[in-house]
Image (spheres, helix red, strand yellow):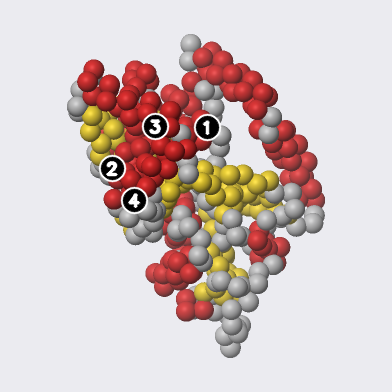
């Protein structure tokens, strides 16, 4: 086995095609975050992005690795690193599905891979289910709620009526009331207007501040990444901006990534002036309808507790949070600096009363911040 570390921009077309083929053969949901296009985009805005290319076979006569021989590519692990050997899943903090693209049945020692990449730590927060080589004992398991639309929107709608009848009646009634009281409601699944994307970012930044959370769009690299992905059009990973309009005015929007079969829900937001109509919920129902018509079988709502996710979901995937370490002082320092905070967050998340109190505190912080 040979492992060669490249920057994403150094991957050639043969290697990219091999990556896509490995994902197609994996049997896992075709999450667009796991496709090479996402890593290529991150590589353009994050200079520390790297890809470990794994190949099987002999060395060349001159001792050179044959990792560039794309017909033998057995796996790809995208990650980010720093000078201290601390590795993070590619796009950690914004990526909703993480892990390696590996040949089915490949036996891989994760710590051997880390050694080849000069990593003492490899951190993740949305590791895909089935990545057994990368799940350490201390990893924490989370549910990532999903909406199943593979049998068509009518089937999803019927399941929603049965599972959340009050939610469904209330949301559809609000949509009708919005149309009567404000103006004609229309929906665009794949909006290309850059002004609509800018408006979504504005709403989302305001939501982050209002709820006392870190504003992701305050970081240039996140904004640049979203703009790059908005222009990406590949079957396995394509940016999709969906907008709910009243007349010509946008009242809710969502930007996410889609493959042929999965829509990864990423950044939803709405105009608070229309909050009483729940435009964000209306938007998600219209997204599900349009996605089903496009042949998309699943909308991944992403990890994280939220009432609207509980109402919309028809199932869940499993993701993991944790870190792999190799014995040594850098790994020990990582455990001392990160694990207490992670365990404290876990303690709060698993206790609804504490979690509710924490959320109220964050909301208060947000209100003070906006004064």
Q: Is mark 3 on a helix, strand or loop?
A: helix
- Nearer the observer: mark 2 or 4; the answer is 4
- Return the residue at label 1: 306
Point out the tag, 4 or 3, that comes first from the N-terminus: 4
Measure how far apart labels 1 and 3 are at the Cα level: 16 Å
Tag 4 or tag 2, which sits nearer the N-term? 4
Q: Where is residue 2 in the image (x, y as percent from the top left)?
A: 61, 75
The one nearer the camera, 275 or 139, is 275
Residue at image location 43% in from the left, 32% down from the top: 165
- Label 1–label 4 contact, CB within 8 A: no
To which residue does mark 4 refer? 152
> Disc number at residue 67?
none
CA gap between label 4 and label 3 equals: 17 Å
- Gap between marks 1 and 4, in whole Å? 25 Å
Residue 189: mark = 2
Disc ID at residue 168 = 3
User: Is 237 placed left or right of 93 in the picture?
Assistant: left
Are the two marked residues, 1 and 3, in contact with CB atoms closer than 8 angstroms?
A: no
Classed neighbour count for the residue bearing mark 3: other residues with Cα under 10 Å, few (<14), some (14–19), many (≥20): many
């Amino acid at each position: 086995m040979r492992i060669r570390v490249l920057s994403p921009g150094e991957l050639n077309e043969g290697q990219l095609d091999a990556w896509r083929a490995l994902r197609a053969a994996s049997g896992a949901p075709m999450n667009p975050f796991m496709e090479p296009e996402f890593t290529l985009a991150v590589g353009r805005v994050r200079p520390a992005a790297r890809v470990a290319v794994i190949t099987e076979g002999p060395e060349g006569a001159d001792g050179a690795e044959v990792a560039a021989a794309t017909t033998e590519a057995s796996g790809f692990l995208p990650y980010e690193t720093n000078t201290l050997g601390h590795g993070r899943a590619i796009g950690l903090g914004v990526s909703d599905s993480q892990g390696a693209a590996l040949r089915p049945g490949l036996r891989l020692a994760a710590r051997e891979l880390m050694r080849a990449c000069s990593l003492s730590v490899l951190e993740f927060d949305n590791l895909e289910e089935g990545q057994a080589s990368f799940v350490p004992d201390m990893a924490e398991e989370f549910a990532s709620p999903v909406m199943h639309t593979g049998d068509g929107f009518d089937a999803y709608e019927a399941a929603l009526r049965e599972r959340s009848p009050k939610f469904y009646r209330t949301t559809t009634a609000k949509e009708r009331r919005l149309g009567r009281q404000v103006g004609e409601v229309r929906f665009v699944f794949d909006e290309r207007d850059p002004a609509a994307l800018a408006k979504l970012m504005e709403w989302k930044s305001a939501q982050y501040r209002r709820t006392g959370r870190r504003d992701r769009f305050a970081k240039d690299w996140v904004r640049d990444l979203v703009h790059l992905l908005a222009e990406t059009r590949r079957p396995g990973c394509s940016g999709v901006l969906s907008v709910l309009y009243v007349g010509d005015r946008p009242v809710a929007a969502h930007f996410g990534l889609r493959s042929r079969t999965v829509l990864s829900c990423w950044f939803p937001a709405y105009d608070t002036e229309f909050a009483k109509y729940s435009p964000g919920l209306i938007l998600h129902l219209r997204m599900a309808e349009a996605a089903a018509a496009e042949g998309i079988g699943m909308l991944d709502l992403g990890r994280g507790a939220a009432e609207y996710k509980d109402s919309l979901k028809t199932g869940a995937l499993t993701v993991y949070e944790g870190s792999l370490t190799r014995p040594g002082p850098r790994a020990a320092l990582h455990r001392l600096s990160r694990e207490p905070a992670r365990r404290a967050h876990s303690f709060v998340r698993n206790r609804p009363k504490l979690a509710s109190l924490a959320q109220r505190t964050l909301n208060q912080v947000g209100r003070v911040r906006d004064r």
